[in-house]
Amino acid sequence: MLLKFFYDEGLAQASYMVGCQASKEAFIIDPARDILPYIEAATKEGLRIVGALETHIHADFVAGSRELAKRLGAKMYLSDEGDKDWKYENISELPHQLVKDGDEIKLGNILFQVLHTPGHTPESLSFLVTDGGAKTEHPMGIFTGDFVFVGDVGRPDLLEKSAQKKGTADKGAKDMYASLSKLEGLPDYVQVWPGHGAGSACGKSLGAIPSSTIGYERRVNWAFQHDDMESFASELLEGQPEPPKYFGIMKQVNKVGPNFTLELRKPERLDDITILTKKIKEGAQVIDTREAALFSKEHIEGTINIPFNQAFTSWAGWIINYEQPLYLLTDPDKLEEIQKTLQSIGIDNLFYYMDVDLAIRMTSDLESYHDITPKEAKELLEEGAQVIDVRHDSEWKSGHIEGAKHIMLGTLLDRLEEVPEDRPLIIQCGSGVRSAIAISLLQAKGVKDVRNMLGGYARWQKDMQ
Amino acid sequence: MLLKFFYDEGLAQASYMVGCQASKEAFIIDPARDILPYIEAATKEGLRIVGALETHIHADFVAGSRELAKRLGAKMYLSDEGDKDWKYENISELPHQLVKDGDEIKLGNILFQVLHTPGHTPESLSFLVTDGGAKTEHPMGIFTGDFVFVGDVGRPDLLEKSAQKKGTADKGAKDMYASLSKLEGLPDYVQVWPGHGAGSACGKSLGAIPSSTIGYERRVNWAFQHDDMESFASELLEGQPEPPKYFGIMKQVNKVGPNFTLELRKPERLDDITILTKKIKEGAQVIDTREAALFSKEHIEGTINIPFNQAFTSWAGWIINYEQPLYLLTDPDKLEEIQKTLQSIGIDNLFYYMDVDLAIRMTSDLESYHDITPKEAKELLEEGAQVIDVRHDSEWKSGHIEGAKHIMLGTLLDRLEEVPEDRPLIIQCGSGVRSAIAISLLQAKGVKDVRNMLGGYARWQKDMQ
Amino acid sequence: MLLKFFYDEGLAQASYMVGCQASKEAFIIDPARDILPYIEAATKEGLRIVGALETHIHADFVAGSRELAKRLGAKMYLSDEGDKDWKYENISELPHQLVKDGDEIKLGNILFQVLHTPGHTPESLSFLVTDGGAKTEHPMGIFTGDFVFVGDVGRPDLLEKSAQKKGTADKGAKDMYASLSKLEGLPDYVQVWPGHGAGSACGKSLGAIPSSTIGYERRVNWAFQHDDMESFASELLEGQPEPPKYFGIMKQVNKVGPNFTLELRKPERLDDITILTKKIKEGAQVIDTREAALFSKEHIEGTINIPFNQAFTSWAGWIINYEQPLYLLTDPDKLEEIQKTLQSIGIDNLFYYMDVDLAIRMTSDLESYHDITPKEAKELLEEGAQVIDVRHDSEWKSGHIEGAKHIMLGTLLDRLEEVPEDRPLIIQCGSGVRSAIAISLLQAKGVKDVRNMLGGYARWQKDMQ
Amino acid sequence: MLLKFFYDEGLAQASYMVGCQASKEAFIIDPARDILPYIEAATKEGLRIVGALETHIHADFVAGSRELAKRLGAKMYLSDEGDKDWKYENISELPHQLVKDGDEIKLGNILFQVLHTPGHTPESLSFLVTDGGAKTEHPMGIFTGDFVFVGDVGRPDLLEKSAQKKGTADKGAKDMYASLSKLEGLPDYVQVWPGHGAGSACGKSLGAIPSSTIGYERRVNWAFQHDDMESFASELLEGQPEPPKYFGIMKQVNKVGPNFTLELRKPERLDDITILTKKIKEGAQVIDTREAALFSKEHIEGTINIPFNQAFTSWAGWIINYEQPLYLLTDPDKLEEIQKTLQSIGIDNLFYYMDVDLAIRMTSDLESYHDITPKEAKELLEEGAQVIDVRHDSEWKSGHIEGAKHIMLGTLLDRLEEVPEDRPLIIQCGSGVRSAIAISLLQAKGVKDVRNMLGGYARWQKDMQ
């Protein structure tokens, strides 16, 4: 048996290739949408990808299983658990097999045993792996998806929050408790290969260790330490962060299949700045992916700044409108990577782009914004300015600037009317990264009297001592 | 005034940007289809491209004027000379101005005077440039298109040969003679900025100097040394090489406009070798762009090898069928550059590609062919093998292997029935480069008993001494 | 706690970063010589590298611990076990701490317990990790170096074979047996993080799974199934492959420290082919790193072909003379990566390079060699040719061509006098990869009547059925 | 004959390759220090570089002739004109030939006639080229070096200003007048191939046209319109810009040969920020090559910002101390190109570099500076701030802010004591580019109360209307 880890840092999402060297075949567990890395790895190892295993209907990224099925003829192994709300749709023309608790799947000498482990979602599965090639009946490990993470378990409240399904959080928390007890029979030495690492919004305190073992989690993971369902459920639901707005869309996409063709067209290059500025005036959504330091100094009026760094996936999912054509101002060398990242969360409406350096040089009246230090902010506050704090609820709750107004960045576009227009604004977050995005949103929406507080709340606290 | 040279080595094609620093505007003379380099150069110099000047309807590449007009709103300045066969079509919705002999065009302080200089084609123009910014009335240079080259003049026989327009060669030769006499009034010091350099199929003995002067050409260029039209015409028509097959298509494309959209879609990536091999069996045209040394060692049966080097443009134009979808086996890192090259000669049917290394590794039964030395070839000839010589007519006429059969590479696909099937074949060209392409064509068409003669006729002569 | 895996595919070597998020410090376990990836990872996570833990004196790569100590001031934690032959030298001026069985090392909240686990080498250590940050006393995993691998244990015979230390193999095998029993007290759930993966020459049947658990290895790994030391030792020593020649050098380098400066100078670029050919005539060692298919077609006489692919590290270690200046013919874009690879096994004498494409084009008389199919090989054999089989001993023992002579590729340069000069040679390996290197060696040493058997013994067996 | 143009945009410097296709040999005229482009071009055309022609001892870049001689055995053709101050030194061991007015040099069929044309410098030569391959005795063109440019002639005052050679400017101006008269006999049609284009500091009004003709310059170039030596000399000397400080060094380097080895060592990578900050405290010169917008936001105290753009060469030559080791904070991907650029003007003391992103992330206390608009600047001025204008003399003379102090950027380090320390400073240039460099210099030297005026004098004028 061969096992290979794949990890998407933007999504904090883990996928896996399991190969049988005897049959020269491979499965991908929870494939991401960009399937090329799997194909390259399999080809290099002399394996053919014959199956894609889905632990559940993902909410945070577009799954690549349909793509593997369509392009390589790989068979999708999909959950048949959960009620009618949780059934995969539009799969009849793709090779697939629906599986339930207790089912077994073979890959050459390797055995995958299906466990139904609801909680994160009702249809969630885990796959217990035994390597017959090693002439053993001892299980080697278990793919847990968003059931058990290293140091945590999956959150059951995503759908309630992001898709407004009332009551599902509570039900999920109790399912999770039951699912955990299902692992009791597994030996300590079994490895745990989870679906996410630290930084994913699918759980609240995921560890920064790639994988673990049943025995270790049993002893150390907080979720295994409860012997009472209620206390477990209440600890589980406490303090979960706001799920990104796009989670609801993703869940739908993964359930019914994307309503887009799989192969993306290359966005059209714009050469003429007048066309772009005309589109901006008509309300086009234009994202500038440069670093905030460059954007603050000069940018085209009406454009939004989401810097292409590790947090890009998440904020793109919060801010970009999936229905409206997307224009990108970017370094053309990074276009392909940015498109792949957008594609990973289902943003397929990237229709146009323009070389940002050319665009800047072609524009005569550029906009900018100022940074200010906490000390300067304090003076402004005394003169009547207003602080907008765009951090998460949990950060806000653990301390904030007196008199500040709290609007989490991801919700800013929906709550524009709450932004006061009669006084200067100071935008503040934790370290100055999110506030830069927020300012670009406000400027693009016509709020011009804004400045960015350098260093965020962290530096405020330090400087105010 | 600012002047910048652009040179496409694959096409041996020259284009130019002329800018006026006072009005901050620029013209492009004979733009190639990929207009990005012009935009970047203009932006860098702080200029806006406001016009595209066409010397004539090109036969060897897709002109970029319509693209400049469509994307930047630049005005096209097009010839209104020549009879009804030589009129630009489908231009009514694009900004343009038809110009005739004697017309004047202004770009800020710079004056372009239009001269009708037929010969290469009936509507050919030249543009004489005077830099008013230098406060002078002395002309600085002349853009001659395919009229006067460094050391040569344009060939008048292209259309007769590539588009079967009978009698046009003779007529053109005489026009050319008259056009040359039109230059008599120009001062010696005027620079000559031609449309092609050495290696273009638009003339036969173009020099390897980027530009020249009227005075120098008048004294040194063979075409200026005749005082008799007949002798001039006969020297001009003598020994012109076969024009590439695609010239006829290009002429049409540039006249009526491309029947394709300007922005190309990115070809779809293939991941599954079985899809490709199925398509090959159904007759798809699949080009492998690796070096011949790699292709000869192992390649997928039914694929054609056109290595992506400097001769690629020309052989692609000869061999690729414009009507049929094109599949590419290539290094993905080179895909964009190859697509641009294909696009420069109007090949827009590149619909699919596959990483050639993956494809090779996924294929179990690979085909190969052998190289042989001239000495080994001689032995085979004595045993009854047949040499196929795929060089140009002029090369063949200046010496060849006894008993060889001559089929110019560009015509091989059309003359397959002339290839003997009852004996081993030895393919030979000048140096071994074209014969490698020829072998791949033959193998793809089912002729398998072939080998490549290393070093071509050059080495044969050396080794046989 | 944070854990990150690093894996060098050329060496099949694993190293690890363990970080404490509380103290913002990190350790590297068994760092490779190129320390930049560790620095980048640590910086990204906001950690400072404060220590380097060595499980043992490595024989297969240059350790990066001295470099981390010198450049970052990191403390080296080195084994103080083993007799005087196994002591680190020249470490007095670098921050370090010698550790013995039972010692404890702290990294913020994280505890590393030192276990002496000889067998692979006498001074070998393992490090048992407990994450105090998780408020637990349960150990999470153990770094085993070359003691326990996934599915195997380290080989004890390296030194006997590569450094001619008589009797050490037997002693090591017995130590290994004792060391394994030391693990008896560890819980099943403890993860095993080994020093190598599949493909390393430090063991014979390493699994293709990145990590394992004590409980799983205890049940499945062959080495844990013996209850008799003798039978264990004999199974362990049976069938170990020839250790690469450079292992003896590496062991010395890692013990006494490299006699080279840490920062490598960029090799000097050669521009003139005549200088290179002169050097070749004087006996310089010149490696051409192109693919074998390109090399076979044309190469400069006297050069050796080691294609830059995954097997490069290993064959470079076998073939390159560490004492003699090294010249490289290569694609300049790959120079830096190749130099890093050479550096990873201590080849620091890369003094000159030349762009291989320029060199080929500047050379008039190029050498080549022919490939032949097994069928053609058979005919040649009947006419008196000789097969040289360059595979490993174990491959030779499991079947070979009748009448073939066996000289393992790594030993070919030392056994040149055994190569017959009176008849044509056919070089054969398993698949045609190693035979290509062998032919280049032979040609460079003046043996010219050689050809490469396509597909190696695998294809021979298939074609001869 | 083959002619190829090479152009270094940073230096606005033109060099040329002339090849004879018959003898397969080439000359390089005024080669830049990086000789690889010439080698690649020659190899591609099948030519061997056999000679390097120097028009004069250059002051603005390190010539590549000695490198071509040393590495390829090319013969240097050097001026033997001028007095003892103008003789090449240390050339005895390199292939060379000293040439004087009237000498002839042959390259296959091509004839180079030497003309002594002093003025820019006393030993300046021009080379008149006749292409015998074209079976003509008509000259084709002339390489004029820094004698005649398109629209201008070389400045004779460089040495007086940059090397304090009194009286040489006047003498040179008169020589120039005489040299121009030497061209009288040349036909109008002869092309002029100059040593510089627009933007070079070697002349004051160079045209943006790559080449010209004798006849056109004779009619249009201002320098040919004088019939009185005095008026010519006075117009020539009027308004020449300050020559960069490094010109004096370059002149010496090109005369006596570089005192450095030709092949540069790769600078050593720094991994530890504490080492860098220690060096900065000790006074090391550390250049940060990021864009000013990034640098202004956060940079390491004591570092100087010279952004790596087209003006880099020039400001590096003004600011960097050639004697003191140079540390670079940069994107490692750009290191090689930056090193080449530094090398082109003889800065060979680049000994260390560090990845600027890593360095920034490793540093806790970063420095920044603020930009202000002209309006904000005006308010500050009224409160007692001081403007420092760092533009060229000629810019200053044509208008400046009232009360501003003028210190040209290139001289700022030498005139630090003139910078007032008792009030806030506003740094201003033409557009905001040079003032950013100036601010970094001031901050590095301990002047901290500085701000950058956005848009420079251009925007000031606009905003103050």
Image (tube, coloured by chain):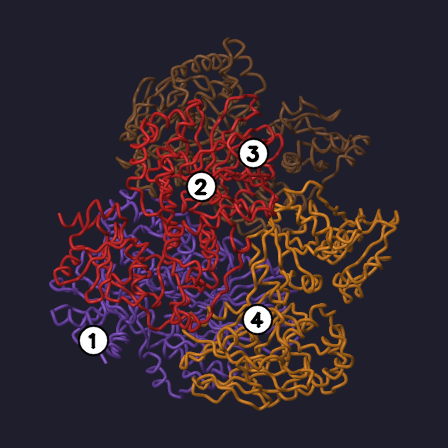
Chain colours: A orange, B red, C purple, D brown
Instruction: Tell me: A306 left or right of B213.
Output: right
The label number, if any, that marks residue B7 in the structure image: 2
Q: CA distance from mark 4 to mark 2?
A: 43 Å
The front one of A423 and C437 is A423
Q: Is residue C146 above or below residue A104?
A: above
Instruction: Tell me: B195 left or right of D136.
Output: right
Amino acid type for the residue under numbered disc 2 = Tyr
Visible residue check, residue D284: no
Q: What chain does badge 2 belong to?
A: B
Amino acid type for the residue under numbered disc 3 = Gly
Q: CA distance from mark 4 to mark 3?
A: 50 Å
Q: CA distance from mark 2 to mark 1?
A: 58 Å
Amino acid type for the residue under numbered disc 1 = Ile
Q: Earlier in the sequence, mark 2 or mark 3?
A: 2
Residue under the point 44% across and 84% down: A108
Amino acid type for the residue under numbered disc 4 = Ala
Q: Secondary structure at mark 4?
A: loop
Q: What chain does badge 3 belong to?
A: B
The front one of C380 and B137 is B137
The label number, if any, that marks residue B19 in the structure image: 3
Discs 4 and 1 lie in a common subunit: no
Check disc 1 and report the residue beneath it: C401
Q: For the residues carrying marks 2 and 1, which lies nearer the camera in this image? A: 2
Q: What chain does badge 4 belong to?
A: A
Q: CA distance from mark 4 to mark 1?
A: 47 Å
Q: Residue D298: percent from the left, percent from the top?
A: 66, 47
Check disc 4 and report the residue beneath it: A32
What is the quadrant of residue A344 in the picture? Answer: bottom right
Q: CA distance from mark 1 to mark 3?
A: 74 Å
Residue under the point 60% across and 27% down: D411
Q: Residue A348: percent from the left, percent from the top?
A: 62, 64
The front one of A231 and A128 is A128
